[in-house]
Protein backbone atom coordinates (compact mmCIF):
# COMPACT_ATOMS: atom_id res chain seq x y z
CA UNK A 1 0.00 0.00 0.00
CA UNK A 2 1.34 3.42 -0.93
CA UNK A 3 1.55 5.69 2.11
CA UNK A 4 1.92 9.43 1.69
CA UNK A 5 3.45 11.53 4.41
CA UNK A 6 5.28 14.81 4.75
CA UNK A 7 8.88 14.18 5.64
CA UNK A 8 11.56 16.65 6.63
CA UNK A 9 12.73 18.62 3.60
CA UNK A 10 16.29 17.61 4.35
CA UNK A 11 15.41 14.01 3.57
CA UNK A 12 14.41 15.01 0.06
CA UNK A 13 17.10 17.60 -0.56
CA UNK A 14 18.29 15.92 -3.77
CA UNK A 15 20.13 18.44 -5.93
CA UNK A 16 18.42 19.27 -9.26
CA UNK A 17 15.18 17.55 -8.17
CA UNK A 18 12.09 19.65 -7.43
CA UNK A 19 9.68 17.82 -5.10
CA UNK A 20 5.97 18.63 -5.01
CA UNK A 21 5.17 15.77 -2.65
CA UNK A 22 7.22 13.61 -0.30
CA UNK A 23 5.91 10.03 -0.49
CA UNK A 24 7.10 7.40 1.97
CA UNK A 25 7.26 4.03 0.17
CA UNK A 26 8.53 0.52 0.81
CA UNK A 27 10.10 -1.94 -1.68
CA UNK A 28 9.08 0.13 -4.69
CA UNK A 29 9.63 -0.71 -8.37
CA UNK A 30 11.13 2.08 -10.50
CA UNK A 31 10.42 2.04 -14.24
CA UNK A 32 11.99 4.54 -16.64
CA UNK A 33 12.37 5.43 -20.33
CA UNK A 34 13.57 8.43 -22.31
CA UNK A 35 12.81 9.77 -25.77
CA UNK A 36 15.66 10.04 -28.22
CA UNK A 37 18.50 7.66 -29.04
CA UNK A 38 17.14 4.79 -26.91
CA UNK A 39 13.53 4.99 -28.12
CA UNK A 40 12.95 3.70 -31.67
CA UNK A 41 9.31 4.03 -32.66
CA UNK A 42 8.61 5.76 -29.31
CA UNK A 43 8.12 2.24 -28.00
CA UNK A 44 9.92 2.55 -24.67
CA UNK A 45 8.38 5.86 -23.64
CA UNK A 46 4.92 4.73 -24.74
CA UNK A 47 5.29 1.56 -22.65
CA UNK A 48 6.21 3.53 -19.53
CA UNK A 49 3.54 6.11 -20.35
CA UNK A 50 0.92 3.38 -20.62
CA UNK A 51 1.86 1.86 -17.26
CA UNK A 52 1.94 5.34 -15.72
CA UNK A 53 -1.65 5.87 -16.87
CA UNK A 54 -2.70 2.32 -16.04
CA UNK A 55 -1.74 2.75 -12.39
CA UNK A 56 -2.86 6.38 -12.03
CA UNK A 57 0.63 7.55 -11.13
CA UNK A 58 0.67 11.12 -9.85
CA UNK A 59 3.58 13.52 -10.18
CA UNK A 60 5.72 13.91 -7.07
CA UNK A 61 8.86 15.49 -8.53
CA UNK A 62 10.55 16.81 -11.67
CA UNK A 63 14.18 17.01 -12.71
CA UNK A 64 15.30 20.61 -13.24
CA UNK A 65 16.07 20.80 -16.99
CA UNK A 66 18.43 23.78 -16.71
CA UNK A 67 21.49 21.64 -15.99
CA UNK A 68 20.92 18.83 -18.47
CA UNK A 69 19.75 20.25 -21.81
CA UNK A 70 21.02 22.39 -24.63
CA UNK A 71 17.83 24.32 -25.28
CA UNK A 72 18.95 25.09 -28.83
CA UNK A 73 18.63 21.33 -29.48
CA UNK A 74 15.76 20.43 -27.11
CA UNK A 75 13.76 23.60 -27.50
CA UNK A 76 11.02 24.63 -25.04
CA UNK A 77 7.50 25.15 -26.42
CA UNK A 78 5.37 28.28 -26.14
CA UNK A 79 1.60 27.95 -25.69
CA UNK A 80 -1.34 30.18 -24.85
CA UNK A 81 -3.23 29.62 -21.63
CA UNK A 82 -6.14 32.02 -21.86
CA UNK A 83 -4.49 35.37 -22.49
CA UNK A 84 -1.22 34.31 -20.89
CA UNK A 85 1.76 32.90 -22.77
CA UNK A 86 3.40 29.89 -21.08
CA UNK A 87 6.69 28.18 -21.78
CA UNK A 88 6.91 24.40 -21.36
CA UNK A 89 10.50 23.33 -20.74
CA UNK A 90 11.87 19.83 -21.42
CA UNK A 91 11.03 17.89 -18.29
CA UNK A 92 11.61 14.52 -16.68
CA UNK A 93 8.73 13.61 -14.40
CA UNK A 94 8.84 11.36 -11.36
CA UNK A 95 5.44 9.80 -10.64
CA UNK A 96 4.16 7.36 -8.04
CA UNK A 97 1.31 4.83 -8.18
CA UNK A 98 0.42 1.37 -6.94
CA UNK A 99 0.56 -1.97 -8.74
CA UNK A 100 -2.26 -4.51 -8.55
CA UNK A 101 -0.44 -6.44 -5.86
CA UNK A 102 0.05 -3.35 -3.67
CA UNK A 103 3.68 -2.68 -4.48
CA UNK A 104 4.51 0.99 -5.07
CA UNK A 105 5.38 1.91 -8.66
CA UNK A 106 7.69 4.82 -9.50
CA UNK A 107 7.89 5.96 -13.12
CA UNK A 108 10.51 8.31 -14.56
CA UNK A 109 9.62 9.52 -18.04
CA UNK A 110 11.31 12.23 -20.06
CA UNK A 111 13.89 13.20 -22.65
CA UNK A 112 17.41 11.85 -22.88
CA UNK A 113 19.60 14.61 -21.39
CA UNK A 114 22.11 16.38 -23.61
CA UNK A 115 24.52 17.36 -20.83
CA UNK A 116 26.00 16.16 -17.51
CA UNK A 117 24.97 12.52 -17.69
CA UNK A 118 26.86 11.59 -14.54
CA UNK A 119 25.12 14.31 -12.55
CA UNK A 120 21.77 13.29 -14.05
CA UNK A 121 22.40 9.66 -13.10
CA UNK A 122 23.37 10.65 -9.56
CA UNK A 123 20.13 12.62 -9.24
CA UNK A 124 18.01 9.63 -10.33
CA UNK A 125 19.91 7.23 -8.08
CA UNK A 126 19.23 9.63 -5.19
CA UNK A 127 15.53 9.75 -6.13
CA UNK A 128 15.42 5.94 -6.13
CA UNK A 129 17.02 5.85 -2.68
CA UNK A 130 14.69 8.53 -1.30
CA UNK A 131 11.64 6.63 -2.56
CA UNK A 132 12.93 3.27 -1.26
CA UNK A 133 13.06 1.60 -4.66
CA UNK A 134 14.22 -2.00 -4.59
CA UNK A 135 14.03 -2.90 -8.28
CA UNK A 136 14.84 -0.65 -11.25
CA UNK A 137 13.73 -1.49 -14.81
CA UNK A 138 14.77 0.65 -17.77
CA UNK A 139 13.22 0.28 -21.22
CA UNK A 140 14.66 0.92 -24.68
CA UNK A 141 13.92 0.19 -28.34
CA UNK A 142 16.23 -0.26 -31.32
CA UNK A 143 15.95 -0.45 -35.10
CA UNK A 144 16.59 -3.87 -36.63
CA UNK A 145 16.05 -5.69 -39.94
CA UNK A 146 12.78 -7.33 -38.92
CA UNK A 147 9.38 -7.49 -40.61
CA UNK A 148 6.52 -5.46 -39.14
CA UNK A 149 4.25 -8.53 -39.07
CA UNK A 150 6.73 -10.63 -37.12
CA UNK A 151 6.42 -10.99 -33.34
CA UNK A 152 8.40 -8.28 -31.57
CA UNK A 153 11.66 -9.55 -30.10
CA UNK A 154 12.45 -8.26 -26.61
CA UNK A 155 15.87 -8.82 -25.06
CA UNK A 156 16.75 -8.41 -21.40
CA UNK A 157 20.10 -7.36 -19.98
CA UNK A 158 21.47 -6.84 -16.49
CA UNK A 159 24.78 -6.29 -14.71
CA UNK A 160 23.46 -8.39 -11.83
CA UNK A 161 24.60 -12.03 -12.01
CA UNK A 162 21.71 -13.20 -9.81
CA UNK A 163 19.11 -11.55 -12.07
CA UNK A 164 20.80 -13.00 -15.16
CA UNK A 165 20.65 -16.46 -13.61
CA UNK A 166 17.03 -16.17 -12.45
CA UNK A 167 15.74 -14.82 -15.78
CA UNK A 168 18.06 -16.80 -18.03
CA UNK A 169 19.63 -13.65 -19.45
CA UNK A 170 22.92 -13.68 -21.29
CA UNK A 171 25.42 -11.13 -19.96
CA UNK A 172 26.31 -8.65 -22.70
CA UNK A 173 29.89 -8.50 -23.92
CA UNK A 174 29.18 -5.24 -25.75
CA UNK A 175 31.87 -2.54 -25.88
CA UNK A 176 31.19 0.77 -27.58
CA UNK A 177 28.96 3.87 -27.45
CA UNK A 178 25.93 3.84 -25.19
CA UNK A 179 22.88 5.95 -24.40
CA UNK A 180 21.52 7.26 -21.12
CA UNK A 181 19.89 3.86 -20.49
CA UNK A 182 23.29 2.16 -20.41
CA UNK A 183 24.70 4.84 -18.11
CA UNK A 184 21.73 4.62 -15.75
CA UNK A 185 21.83 0.83 -15.62
CA UNK A 186 25.43 0.97 -14.47
CA UNK A 187 24.68 3.72 -11.95
CA UNK A 188 21.74 1.84 -10.46
CA UNK A 189 23.73 -1.38 -10.33
CA UNK A 190 26.56 0.27 -8.42
CA UNK A 191 23.95 2.01 -6.25
CA UNK A 192 22.88 -1.37 -4.89
CA UNK A 193 19.59 -1.77 -6.76
CA UNK A 194 18.27 -4.86 -8.55
CA UNK A 195 18.52 -3.29 -12.01
CA UNK A 196 17.81 -4.63 -15.47
CA UNK A 197 16.80 -3.39 -18.91
CA UNK A 198 14.42 -4.60 -21.63
CA UNK A 199 14.82 -3.62 -25.30
CA UNK A 200 12.32 -4.13 -28.12
CA UNK A 201 13.13 -4.51 -31.82
CA UNK A 202 11.43 -2.09 -34.24
CA UNK A 203 11.58 -2.58 -38.05
CA UNK A 204 14.14 -0.15 -39.46
CA UNK A 205 12.10 0.73 -42.56
CA UNK A 206 9.24 2.16 -40.47
CA UNK A 207 11.19 3.24 -37.40
CA UNK A 208 10.08 6.87 -37.79
CA UNK A 209 6.48 5.79 -37.09
CA UNK A 210 5.31 5.27 -33.48
CA UNK A 211 5.11 1.54 -32.76
CA UNK A 212 2.42 0.58 -30.26
CA UNK A 213 3.13 -3.04 -31.19
CA UNK A 214 6.68 -2.77 -29.79
CA UNK A 215 5.35 -0.79 -26.82
CA UNK A 216 2.87 -3.59 -26.10
CA UNK A 217 5.69 -6.17 -26.25
CA UNK A 218 7.68 -4.17 -23.69
CA UNK A 219 4.66 -3.81 -21.41
CA UNK A 220 4.07 -7.56 -21.64
CA UNK A 221 7.69 -8.25 -20.73
CA UNK A 222 7.54 -5.89 -17.75
CA UNK A 223 4.31 -7.32 -16.34
CA UNK A 224 5.62 -10.86 -16.82
CA UNK A 225 8.73 -9.89 -14.87
CA UNK A 226 6.65 -8.23 -12.13
CA UNK A 227 4.10 -11.09 -12.17
CA UNK A 228 1.07 -8.81 -12.48
CA UNK A 229 -1.91 -8.77 -14.92
CA UNK A 230 -1.48 -7.03 -18.27
CA UNK A 231 -4.74 -5.10 -18.69
CA UNK A 232 -3.53 -3.40 -21.89
CA UNK A 233 -6.73 -3.41 -23.97
CA UNK A 234 -6.31 0.07 -25.47
CA UNK A 235 -2.66 -0.63 -26.28
CA UNK A 236 -3.64 -3.94 -27.89
CA UNK A 237 -6.20 -2.11 -30.06
CA UNK A 238 -3.57 0.45 -31.04
CA UNK A 239 -1.10 -2.33 -31.92
CA UNK A 240 -3.67 -4.03 -34.18
CA UNK A 241 -4.49 -0.73 -35.87
CA UNK A 242 -0.77 -0.03 -36.31
CA UNK A 243 -0.23 -3.30 -38.17
CA UNK A 244 -3.14 -2.58 -40.55
CA UNK A 245 -1.81 0.91 -41.27
CA UNK A 246 1.72 -0.34 -41.89
CA UNK A 247 0.37 -3.06 -44.20
CA UNK A 248 -1.35 -0.35 -46.27
CA UNK A 249 1.79 1.80 -46.28
CA UNK A 250 4.00 -1.06 -47.46
CA UNK A 251 1.55 -2.22 -50.11
CA UNK A 252 1.37 1.30 -51.54
CA UNK A 253 5.15 1.50 -52.09
CA UNK A 254 6.58 -1.15 -54.46
CA UNK A 255 10.15 -0.62 -53.25
CA UNK A 256 9.14 -0.88 -49.62
CA UNK A 257 7.02 -3.93 -50.35
CA UNK A 258 9.95 -5.62 -52.09
CA UNK A 259 12.24 -4.88 -49.16
CA UNK A 260 9.70 -6.15 -46.62
CA UNK A 261 9.21 -9.34 -48.63
CA UNK A 262 12.97 -9.85 -48.73
CA UNK A 263 13.04 -9.63 -44.95
CA UNK A 264 10.36 -12.32 -44.76
CA UNK A 265 12.31 -14.54 -47.15
CA UNK A 266 15.54 -14.02 -45.22
CA UNK A 267 13.77 -14.80 -41.95
CA UNK A 268 12.41 -18.03 -43.41
CA UNK A 269 15.96 -19.02 -44.39
CA UNK A 270 17.39 -18.30 -40.97
CA UNK A 271 18.34 -21.41 -39.07
CA UNK A 272 18.51 -19.55 -35.76
CA UNK A 273 15.34 -18.03 -34.35
CA UNK A 274 16.27 -14.88 -32.43
CA UNK A 275 13.53 -15.54 -29.89
CA UNK A 276 15.20 -18.83 -28.98
CA UNK A 277 18.69 -17.35 -29.16
CA UNK A 278 19.04 -14.24 -26.95
CA UNK A 279 22.64 -13.80 -28.09
CA UNK A 280 21.42 -13.04 -31.62
CA UNK A 281 19.22 -10.24 -30.32
CA UNK A 282 22.07 -8.89 -28.21
CA UNK A 283 24.25 -8.86 -31.34
CA UNK A 284 21.56 -6.79 -33.05
CA UNK A 285 21.55 -4.36 -30.13
CA UNK A 286 25.31 -4.00 -30.19
CA UNK A 287 25.32 -3.44 -33.95
CA UNK A 288 22.61 -0.79 -33.56
CA UNK A 289 24.62 1.11 -30.96
CA UNK A 290 27.74 1.08 -33.11
CA UNK A 291 25.82 2.30 -36.17
CA UNK A 292 24.34 5.16 -34.16
CA UNK A 293 27.83 6.25 -33.19
CA UNK A 294 28.95 6.20 -36.81
Image (cartoon, rainbow, N blue to C red):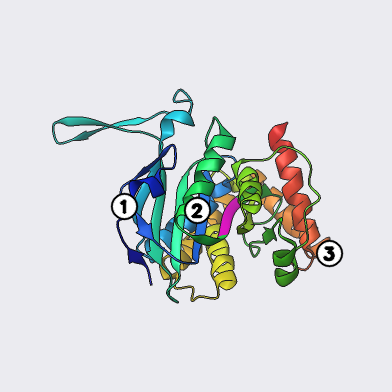
Answer yes or no: is residue 212 visible: no
Say whether residue 228 is magenta.
Answer: no
Instruction: Give the residue displayed 44% in from the left and 73% down from the top.
Output: 231
Dominant SS type (magenta): strand
Q: Residue furthest right?
A: 271
Where, quadrant-wise, is the N terminus in this rendering?
bottom left
Mark pair 1, 2: CA separation:
15 Å
Rendered image quadrant of residue 288: top right
Answer yes or no: is residue 262 visible: yes
Q: Earlier in the sequence, mark 1 or mark 2?
A: 1
Any mark on residue 265, and which? none
Residue located beneath label 3 in the image? 272
For this view, does 216 lie left or right of residue 105?
right
Residue located beneath label 2 in the image? 128
Q: Secondary structure at mark 2?
A: helix
Question: Which numbered mark, 3 or 2, is in the foreground of this view?
Answer: 2
Question: In front: 206, or 163?
Answer: 163
Bounds of the magenta segment? 136-140
Residue located beneath label 1 in the image? 21
Q: Earlier in the sequence, mark 3 or mark 1?
A: 1
Query: Do the CB atoms of the residues marked 3 and 2 lie less than 8 Å apart?
Result: no
Mark pair 3, 1: CA separation:
50 Å
For this view, does 156 lie left or right of residue 55?
right
Question: In front: 66, or 245?
Answer: 66
Q: Quick one: label 2, few (<14), some, or many (20+) residues within 10 Å?
A: many
In this rendering, the answer to whether 135 lies above or below 211 is: below
Amino acid sequence: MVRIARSADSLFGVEHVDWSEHPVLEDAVLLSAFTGWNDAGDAATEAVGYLTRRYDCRQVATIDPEYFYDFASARPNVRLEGEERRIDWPVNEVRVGELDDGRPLITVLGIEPRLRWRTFSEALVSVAHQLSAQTVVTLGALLTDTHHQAPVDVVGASSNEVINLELGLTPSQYEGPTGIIGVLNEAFHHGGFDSLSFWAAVPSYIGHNPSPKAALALVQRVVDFLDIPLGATDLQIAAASYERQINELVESDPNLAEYAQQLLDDAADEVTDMTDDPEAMIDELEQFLRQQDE
